[in-house]
Image (tube, rainbow, N blue to C red):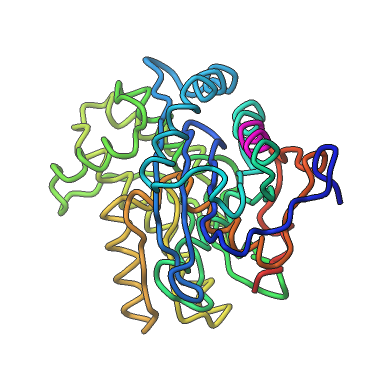
């Protein structure tokens, strides 16, 4: 395989740090990691900039323009935090998919430019798989199940026959996007999830309003409850009580299918991943279920649950060790790449 006009550069055996670039949606992030000991990650840098629209949701092209403007500063800050120069890196990794096409292309362009300029291997990684692998690298878990809840993605994943299989997922929108949809209608600023959590904490937990709870086999649906929640607000129920009901119903659906997946797969370790997984109530419910089943539980710190460059760098490191570098001309972004199409060559 070739990179630009030349061969893919060989790994520098003296370099051990990989730089990762994340740009799937509203966040442009750069992280630098190294392998502290076999299978365990050490984060050297983790810098990010997030698009926060004044109103409405994320517009892909506008977000991409903002990413392009902020990329040099975020990159410089990450290298400064890691105390490294680009030529001291082992490789450049980037989120290849899934995600918003214009945003993905910004990150890929920055990654290719760095790889070519400094003669470094280039590694494209799957964003969803990166959430799982950073959790493994932090916790030391061997073969966990991942409850992954973010803006666009809501899935339960586990390794089976050489791929991370989807044992349950949303049939329509991701839970994070559903939270943002409700938040816009309720006048809550973007992102909606943290404010919903803050308001829910003010509610009377003994009071539970009715909302749709849609579990279909191993899958979920989140498209209907935002409208139902808006109706409750319009009927005069407090925003705090509605937010409490949202969390109790939708998180219970997540934990229900997660418990079924644990039973079906026989896994004995449970990881959380994704921005929605920052929610303390979701963590409480998942931890309680895991404890009842005798399953080990781990939730990464907030900075490594949200979209971040460190997780991209860590999966890039793992793929690089397994020969996963790509040529520039083979590094096109894959906005619709499914998690279960990725060959897990590093395990």
Task: Classify the position of the C terminus by image quarter.
Answer: bottom right
Q: Is residue 67 magenta?
A: no
Q: Position of residue 183 (x, y in %)?
A: 35, 28
Q: Is residue 321 left or right of residue 251?
A: right
**Closer to the camera in the image, 148 or 140:** 140
Q: Nearer the viewer, residue 85 or 277?
A: 85
Q: Which residues are magenta?
A: 108-114
Q: Nearer the viewer, residue 312 or 162?
A: 312
Residue 320 drawn at (x, y percent) = 66, 61
x and y percent of residue 232 in the render? 30, 32
Residue 339: tell me if it is visible: yes
Q: Residue, x 67% and y 50% (percent of image)?
A: 123
**Residue drawn at (32%, 48%) of the image:** 247
- Give the dominant element type of the magenta stretch: helix, strand or loop: helix
The picture quadrant where one finds residue 321 is bottom right
Q: Is residue 343 above or below residue 104?
A: below
Q: Residue 219's quadrant in the figure?
A: bottom right
199 sits to left or right of 142: left
Query: In the figure, is residue 281 to the left or right of 184?
Result: left
Name the one closer to the observer, 158 or 330. Answer: 330
Is residue 217 visible from the viewing direction of this image? no
| x and y percentages locating residue 20 in the rendered image | 54, 47
């Amino acid at each position: 395989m070739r990179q630009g006009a030349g061969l893919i550069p060989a790994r520098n055996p003296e370099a051990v740090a990989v730089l990762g670039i994340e740009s799937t949606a509203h966040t442009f992030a750069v992280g630098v990691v190294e392998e502290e000991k076999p299978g365990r990650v050490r984060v050297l840098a983790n810098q990010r900039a997030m698009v926060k629209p004044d109103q409405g949701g994320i517009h892909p092209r506008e977000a991409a323009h903002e990413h392009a403007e902020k990329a040099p500063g975020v990159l410089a800050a990450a290298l400064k935090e890691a105390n490294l120069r680009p030529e001291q890196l082992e490789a450049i990794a980037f989120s290849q998919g899934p995600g918003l096409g214009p945003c993905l292309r910004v990150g890929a362009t920055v990654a290719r430019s760095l790889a070519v300029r400094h003669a470094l291997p280039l590694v494209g990684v799957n964003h969803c798989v990166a959430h799982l692998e950073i959790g493994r690298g932090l916790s030391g878990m061997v073969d966990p199940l991942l409850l992954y809840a973010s803006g666009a993605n809501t899935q339960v994943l586990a390794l089976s026959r050489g791929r991370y299989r989807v044992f349950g997922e949303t049939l329509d929108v991701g839970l994070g996007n559903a939270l943002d949809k409700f938040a816009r209608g309720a006048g809550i600023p973007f992102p909606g999830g943290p404010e919903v959590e803050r308001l829910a904490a003010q509610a009377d937990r003994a009071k539970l309003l009715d909302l749709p709870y849609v579990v279909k086999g191993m899958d979920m649906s989140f498209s209907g409850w935002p409208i139902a929640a808006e109706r409750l607000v319009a009927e005069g129920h407090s925003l705090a009580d509605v937010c409490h009901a949202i969390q109790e119903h939708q998180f219970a659906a997540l934990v229900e299918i997660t418990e079924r997946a644990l039973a079906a797969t026989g896994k004995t370790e449970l990881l959380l991943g994704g921005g929605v997984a920052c929610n303390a109530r979701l963590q409480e419910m998942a931890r309680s279920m895991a404890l009842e089943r005798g399953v080990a539980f781990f939730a990464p710190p907030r900075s490594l649950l949200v979209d971040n460059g460190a997780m991209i760098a860590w999966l890039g490191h793992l793929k690089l060790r397994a020969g996963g570098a790509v040529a520039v001309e083979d590094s096109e972004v894959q906005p619709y790449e499914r998690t279960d199409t990725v060959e897990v060559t590093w395990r």
